[in-house]
Amino acid sequence: MKATVSFMLNGKPVTVESPRDRMLVWVLRDELGLTGTKVGCEAGLCGACTVLVDSEAMPSCSTALGDVAGKSVLTIEGLAVDGKLNPVQEAFREHSAFQCGYCTSGMIMAAWALLKKKPKATRSEIIEAMEGNLCRCGAHVRILDAVESAGQAMGGAR
Amino acid sequence: MRRRDFLESVAAGTLTLFFTSPLGSAPIVPTRPGAYPEDFNAYLKIAADGRVTCMVGKVELGQGAMTVLAMLVGEELELDPAKVEMVLGDTDLCPWDMPTGGSLTMWHTAPVLRGAAAEARAVLLRMASRALGAPVSDLAMKDGAIWMKSAPARRTTFGELVQGRKLERHLGKVKPKALADCTVIGRRVSRKDALAKVTGAAKYAGDLRLPGTLHACILRPPAQGQTLVAADTSAAERVHGVRIVRDGSLLAVLHPQPDVAHKALALVKGTFEGPEPDVDDARIYQYLVDRAAPGQRVVISRGDVAVGEKRAATVVEAEYRNAYESHATLEPHVSVAQWDGNRMTVWSSTQSPFVFRDSVAEALKLPPDKVHVIAQLVGGGFGGKLAGPDAVEAARLARQVPGVPIQVAWNREEDLFLDGYRPAAVVKIRAGLDAGRGAITFWDCTAAGVSQGEAELAYDMQTSRYQAPTVPNLHPLKVGAWRAPNAHTNAFARESQLDALAAKAGLDPVTLRRRLITDGRLLNLLEQAVEAFGWEPAPGPTGRGIGLACGAWRQGLVVAIAQVSVDKATGKVKAERVLEAVDVGLVVNPDGARQQVEGAITQCIGQALSEEIRFRGGRILDKNFDTYLLPRFSAIPRIQVVFADTGTSVTQGIGEPPVVPVAAALANAVFDATGARVTHVPFTPERVLEALKHVPAK
C-alpha cells in the first residue's frame, strides 16, 4: 500500500510515494538514486547502510520509510558542502582509511554521528561507536586513526 | 569507445620509420588467453589533448591496482599518477589478462606494463627529437611536455606529437628507468579511488541504474548441490509487476524493485532433489581423512623419513585442522546483464573479467567475442569472485528477456550459501629434532582437504615427505581459492609443529629457526622482525603470550610475531599486537603495500579466532553476520609493518604473502601465554578451553 511520505533529505525536502514499511535503503537507492548507501546484510548487522536520522546513526536497511516521516535524513551524498569534504571524509581520504570502499559510506556516517556529538571522543569510545560497522578488507586501524584525526580537526583536540 | 581505437597489431616492418597512423585503420589484436600483447598501444593511448589512458585487464578490488599501475605508467612517462586515466577489466577495451588474484598483478602484469610505458617513453622522445631537431640526450620530459634542456622554450607536447593517432614506432624491449632515477616509485601517492569512495560516488555493479532494469531473485535449494524439479509460482505471479523467468533449473522472480522481487520469491514453492552428504561441521575432519585415505599420494619426498626418525631425539606428532571459511566480501556477488539480440553485455563485481566472459559464453553457447564483460569497482574479492556464477545467472535470465537489463544481486544468505569456501583441512605431522637440537631429522606430513602448496619453506630438513589426496570432489561443500590458498593451512601446521618441537626440546623458537633456515633472505627478514618487535629469547611457554611464524607465497616472504592475551576462564583470545616483516622485492607504492599487510593481519584475526561455516549435509547454517563472525573493531590489535629493503627492481605482489603466517603466529602466542596448543582454526573460546584442559599441571 503506497503512502505519501515527506522528510528532509540532505537538507532538502523530499516527498516519495511508497509503502510506509519499505526499508529506507531501497527508497534511497532505487527511488531517489542515491547509491552511496550500500546494502551488506539487510539485517542491521554490518553497518554498510548507515545513515543519520535526526543526527542518530541508523541502519537504513532496517529503518522503515514511515519511521522517517517528518524527520531529517543525512546520507553520504549530503556530507560534502559545495564540493568541500566534511572533516571525516577528508580524514578518510588522508589516511586511505578504506580499501574496497564498500563499507566506507557507512563508516563515515557512523563516525560523523559520533563526532558531531563528541569530537573529543577517545579511542575506546570510537571503537564502541563503530563496533556495529564491518570492514572485510581490514582497514580498521586506519579508520580509527582517521576518526581520531577528524575529531581533532573539528576542534576536539585532546 | 571502440576497441580498434587502441588495440592493434602492427607488423615488424614499420620499425624503420616513426609516424602515427589514423585511428581505426588497424586490425584488432586478438585478446588471446595466455599471452600479453607485445604492442604497447594495447596498454596505452595518448589522446589529441595529450591525456594518457592506460588499459589493463586487472581489476580494482580495493587492493590498489588502479593506483599502483598508474604509478608505473606515470614513472616512465613523467606524469603525476593522478593524471593517468585507468581503464580496468573491460574485456573489449583491455588486453587479455589473468584473474586479479594470487598476487599476480605486480608479479606478472607490472613488468609488462612498465616495459610498455618505457617503450612509449622512448618513442615519444624519438618523435620529439625529430620535431625539435635535437638529440634525445638534450630532451627533458614532464607532465606531458618535452623540451630541450639547452633551450627550454623549444618544446612540444604528447598531444602535438601524437595528434590523436596511434603510435606505430616499435623499439622492442626498452628498459624501464633505473631505480635511482625514479621519482614516483617508492613515493607516497594518494589513492586514485579515494575521492569517489569517501563521497559515495564510487560505482559498484549494484549501483548501475540502467533504465528498465529488473532485479532478479533466484529460487535457491535448501542444500548445496540440489536441483529444482518442480515449482508453484502462482502466488508470486499475482504480485503486481512480477515476472517469472525459468531456464532449466534456474527460476527467478523479476521486478523493478529488489525488495518486492525478494518478497515475491518467498511465495514460490519449489521442490528440489539431490543427495545430501551425511556429514556436518563437527564430523567433517574424519570425513575428509576417510575419503582421502585410499587416494593418498606422496607429492614431496626427500630421503627416507623412516631412517630420519631413527636419528631423532625429540619427536612431536600432531594433527592440525581448519574449518571452512567464507570470503564474506562486504559487497555480495552482483552482476547485471543485457542481451541486445547479438551480444551480451555483463557488468560485474569480478576478479576475472576474462574468465567471466568465457563462462558466460560457454553457458550461452556464444563465441567469446559475443560477450562483453565490464568490471566495476569491486567490494572485496579475496578469491571469492573468480568464477562468475552470478554473471552466468544474470546472462541466462537476460537472454530470455532481450533488451532488459537484469540485475542479480545475491543477498547475504545467498552469498554465504553459494560461496566457494576456503577448504576445511586436516594436516597430520610427525617430525623430530636431533639430540643437538640443530636439525630436523624427519618431517612426515599427511594432508586431507588441502594440497602441498607452500608446504615447504627454506628450512633444512634431512628427510621429509608430504602426502596429499588425489581423490576428486573430496569436499562435500563447494570450495575455492581463499587468499593464499593452501599456503595458510600448510603454514599453520608447519609453524605450529616447529613451535611444538622447540618447546619440547626446551629451545627458544627463534633460535630453532635460525638454525634451520637455509635462505639468506628469510634469515635477514627473521632478524629484522625480531629486532623490530623486541623479541627476548626464551623457551616457551613463557607466559608472555608472544608467538612467531614464518611463511611464503612464491617469492614473497613474511615473518609474523603476535602477542595475545588469553582469558583462561572464558577461553577468549585477544590479539594485542601483531608485527609483520615482509620481503616482496621492490615496493612500488609503500603506503598501498602497507595497507595490504594491515588488511591481511586484520582479516586473519577473524580467520584465526572466529570464522567458521557451520553446516549439516548440504545446508549452510550460517546465514548472516550474527553467527558468521567477522572481526569487529574491538578485536583489532596494534599492527606494525616492516618492509625489507632489498635493493631489487623486481616486483612480486603483496595480496597473498602477509596472510600466510598470521594464524600460526597467533596459535604459537596462545601456547606461549598458556602452555595450551591450539591446533584447530578458528581457535574459538570453546576450543581454547578444551586445549587448556590438556595443559599439564606444573
Image: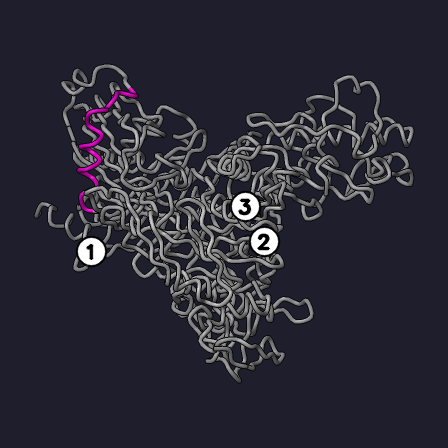
Instruction: Give amino acid for label 2.
Output: Val
For label 1, the residue is: B571
The span picked out in magenta is B282-300
Separation of residues labelled 2 and 3 (CA atoms):
9 Å
Q: Nearer the viewer, mark 1 or mark 3?
A: 3
Q: Position of residue B216 (x, y in %)?
A: 48, 55
N-term mark: 1 or 3: 3
Does residue B154 belong to the magenta stretch?
Answer: no
> Is residue B292 shown in magenta?
yes
Going from the N terminus, do you reach mark 2 or mark 3 first? Answer: 3
Q: Amino acid at mark 3?
A: Arg
Frontmost of labels 1 and 2 is 2
Q: Which residue is mark 2?
A: B404
Q: Chain of mark 1?
A: B
Above-or-below relation of B32 to B540: above
Q: Judging from the image, what secondary structure is the residue with disc 2 in?
A: loop
Q: Is residue B584 left or right of residue B56?
A: left
In the image, is residue B61 above or below residue A65?
Answer: above
Query: Marks 1 and 3: CB-CB under 8 Å?
Result: no
